Amino acid sequence: MQGNLPPEAQEKIEQLQDLQETAQQVAVQKQEAESSLTEAENALEELEEIDEDTQMYRKVGELLVETGYDQAEEDLDDKVDSLEIRLETLEKQEDRVQDQFESLQGELEDLLGGGGGMGGPAGPGGPGAGGA
């Protein structure tokens, strides 16, 4: 099917496929970061509910190491801050990839004569729907 396309169009299709793969990877990383952030925020909330004299441990690899309340709170605060920055970075990356994808898709449509293909503006509810 792609054998009939001009080389430039084939190249753009390959770039679109690469961008789609990148978008999937970013989405997985974002989901993992969101999950870790929620977990850290929940731990921080729980920490606020316990007595500061309570004996606590933190996981270091396969070991549990005793830690103090202040250190546990500081570690969780740092983790939350770090994950929020990571999530923000991933969201920006996700937006950039989406913009690149849409731009490349437009270039490919122009190359192929634009318009009448599947999912184009003619299709109701498609990505090109919505009007002026």
Image (spheres, rainbow, N blue to C red):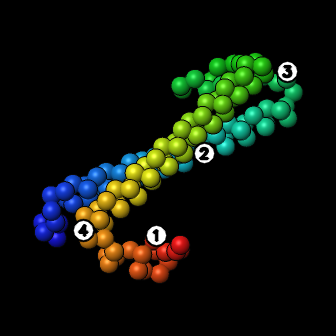
- Using the numbered discs, state the Cα–Cα distance from disc 4 to disc 2 in whole angstroms: 42 Å
Quadrant for residue 1, please give it: bottom left
Instruction: Return the residue at label 2.
Output: 35
Q: Looking at the image, is mark 4 or mark 1 nearer the viewer?
A: 4
Residue 127's disc number: 1
Structural distance between the alpha carbons of marks 3 and 4 = 70 Å
Secondary structure under tag 2 reads helix
**Alpha carbon separation for disc pair 3 and 2:** 29 Å
Residue at image coords 46%, 47%: 96
Q: Which residue is mark 3?
A: 53
Given residues 126 and 62, the one toward you in this image is 126
CB under 8 Å between callouts 2 and 1? no
Q: Is residue 81 left or right of residue 50?
A: left
User: Which of marks 4 and 3 precedes in the sequence?
Assistant: 3
**Residue 57, percent across and down?**
69, 24
Residue at the far front in the pictured view: 132
Q: N-terminal of the two: label 3 or label 2?
A: 2
Frontmost of labels 3 and 2 is 2
Instruction: Indicate the amino acid at tag 4.
Output: Leu
Name the residue at 63% across, 37% down: 84
The residue wearing badge 4 is 112
For badge 2, the amino acid type reads Ser
Density class for disc 4 (Cα within 10 Å; few <14, some 14-19, many ≥20) is some
Label 3: how many Cα within 10 Å (few below 14, some 14–19, many 20+) = few
Would residue 49 appear left or right of 121 to someone viewing this image?
right
Q: Is the residue under label 2 in contact with that under label 4 (CB below 8 Å)?
A: no
Q: CA distance from mark 3 to mark 1?
A: 57 Å
Amino acid identity at mark 1: Pro
* Mark nearer the viewer, 3 or 1: 1
Nearest to viewer (mark 2 / mark 1): 1
Which sits earlier in the primary sequence, circle 3 or circle 1?
A: 3
The nearer-to-camera label among 4 and 2 is: 4
